[in-house]
Amino acid sequence: MTDPLLSSVLGEKISQKLHDQQHKPGLYVVATPIGNILDISLRALYIFKKSKYIFAEDTRQTKKLLNFYEIKTPLITCHEYNEDHPSVISKIEPNDIYALVSDAGTPLISDPGYRIVDWCVKHQIEVFPVPGACAPIAGLSAAGLPTDNFTFHGFLPSKARARRSRLDIVKDMTSTAVFLESPERILDSLQDMLEIFGDRRACICREITKIFEEFRRGNLSELIEYFSKNKPIGEFLVIISGKREICIDKGAAFVELSAELKTETLKNAVMKVFSKYEISKKAIYDKALEIKRESS
């Protein structure tokens, strides 16, 4: 028999399918929308409905989500200062279903939740993920930068010296780097990145899935110029290309350059090769001119 509340929100057929699934007792780590309230899975709504309690970083924020979907499961505040406190973990019993949520996105990803999950694991309470929205992954999917190898660094330190030290560790990594940043510090961080990384390709993702969503792509110097003229507002994700592969033998790069010049303008061909190989732009440009002269 289907749940009438779920049927009204999800539809009779979907509600029945969810009802037929067997969900084991335990703690369900549930991803919630990072902006658009429709970005939530049907399974997440079902787990919310079936949970004895929902452990929430900010009950006021989660209450808005539950009210939208007409779910009345009790909420318990669970944040970084109390998540393993007896007042919280004493609520968890072996034979019931519980949900854990952060303010937005996937819990534990630059959000609280690790200690309550760790407590459950140590006390043989099963833990299950309910996947969904995650700002770093959402940003990567639309950034236009390599995604086959990336590293997530969370928020950079607020102090300049500590921030620069962290960036100095990252500068030689070849993987795409993903950072979270606040509007108050975005320009300072971009300036430090330009100085330490060089003028790499990057994408600034702002207010992902929200009304004023923006993806600003370009070299770091171009992004600094833009945000110097346009006040940074909202939540930021900074995605930067990794260190270009070192090409000791320039032959491979110049073979690729020759191939690019057959279909691209000189400028575009130079930029494509420059973005991939650790060779000066002038050297690539000079070689491009040489190739052009030889072919004419």
Image (cartoon, rainbow, N blue to C red):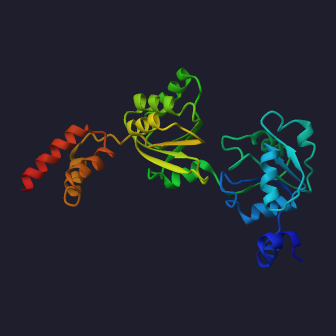
Write the residue at 33% across / 46% down. Answer: 276
Write the residue at 90% across / 48% down. Answer: 92
- Is any part of residue 252 visible from this angle? no
Compare residues 251 and 92 and report the one nearer the observer: 92
Residue 155's x, y, as percent?
60, 35
Is residue 175 left or right of 286 when viewed as pictured? right
| The quadrant where residue 244 appears | top left
The residue sitting at the top extreme is 161
Write the residue at 20% across / 51% down. Answer: 266
Residue 15's x, y, as percent?
80, 73
> Which quarter of the rendered picture does the N terminus lie within?
bottom right
> Which quarter of the rendered picture does the C terminus lie within?
bottom left
Compare residues 51 and 211 and report the one nearer the observer: 211
Residue 26's x, y, as percent?
84, 54
Identify whether 100 is placed above or below 70: above
Is residue 242 left or right of 80 when viewed as pictured? left
Identify whether 270 is placed above or below 66: above
Is residue 198 left or right of 259 when viewed as pictured? right
- Is any part of residue 238 visible from this angle? yes
Residue 205's x, y, as percent?
53, 46
Identify whether 231 is placed above or below 188: below
